[in-house]
Amino acid sequence: MEKSSAQTVVKVISILYWIGAGLGAIGGLLMLFGGSAIGMTGFASISGLFGGLFAAMGIVMIAFAVLGFFVGLGLWRNRNWARITAIVLGVIGLLSFPIGTIINAIIIYFLAFNKDVKNLFR
């Protein structure tokens, strides 16, 4: 693989991180506001529990979306910290069966094992 091909692979991975960050932020906001709405229904204490749980999960999703945005930006700029963070997130993302497993395995392969891609980050 030549340098321009390796750069294209990194740009595509960056865009995938930005798409994932956008979708994660939307999902997190929906869970945050949905959890608040569930908590306000007033049906027994269980609604408060589920409302708080959904809101907390929404906050975690938003935090991961922000992280994903900055990882995508770092990859776009060929920052080694972003490559390492993307590999770690890719390993965690292997649990997203089946499509997430395939996508994250490909990301891990290119960022961790492809010499031309690794050389871009030096």
Image (tube, rainbow, N blue to C red):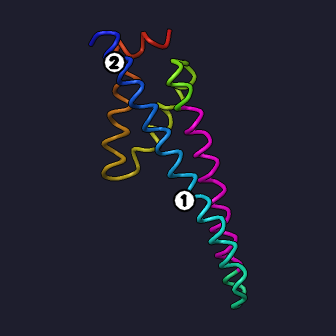
Q: Position of residue 113 (x, y in %)?
A: 35, 20
Categorize mark 1 by other alpha carbons within 10 Å: few (<14), some (14-19), many (20+).
Answer: some
Q: Quadrant of the N terminus?
A: top left
Q: Residue at x 53, y 52 (%)?
A: 24
Q: Residue at x 57, y 22 (%)?
A: 81
Q: Residue at x 59, y 53 (%)?
A: 61
Q: Amino acid at mark 1?
A: Gly
5 with respect to 23 (left or right): left
Q: Main secondary structure of the magenta part?
A: helix
Say which quarter of the image contains residue 32: bottom right
Secondary structure beneath label 2: loop
Q: Residue furthest bottom?
A: 43
119 with respect to 22 (left or right): left
Of badges 2 and 1, the one in the foreground is 1
Q: Residue furthest left?
A: 1
Secondary structure beneath label 1: helix
Tell me, yes or no, whether the highlighted magenta stretch contains residue 50. yes
Image: magenta residue range: 48-71
CA distance for labels 2 and 1:
33 Å
Q: Position of residue 41 (x, y in %)?
A: 69, 86
The residue to which callout 1 is attached is: 27
Q: Which mark is residue 114?
A: 2
- Residue nearer the viewer, 70 or 82: 70
Q: Amino acid at mark 2?
A: Asn
Say which quarter of the image contains residue 73: top right
Of the image marks 2 and 1, the number of the one nearer the N terminus:
1
Q: Residue at x 59, y 46 (%)?
A: 64
- Residue nearer the viewer, 57 or 70: 70
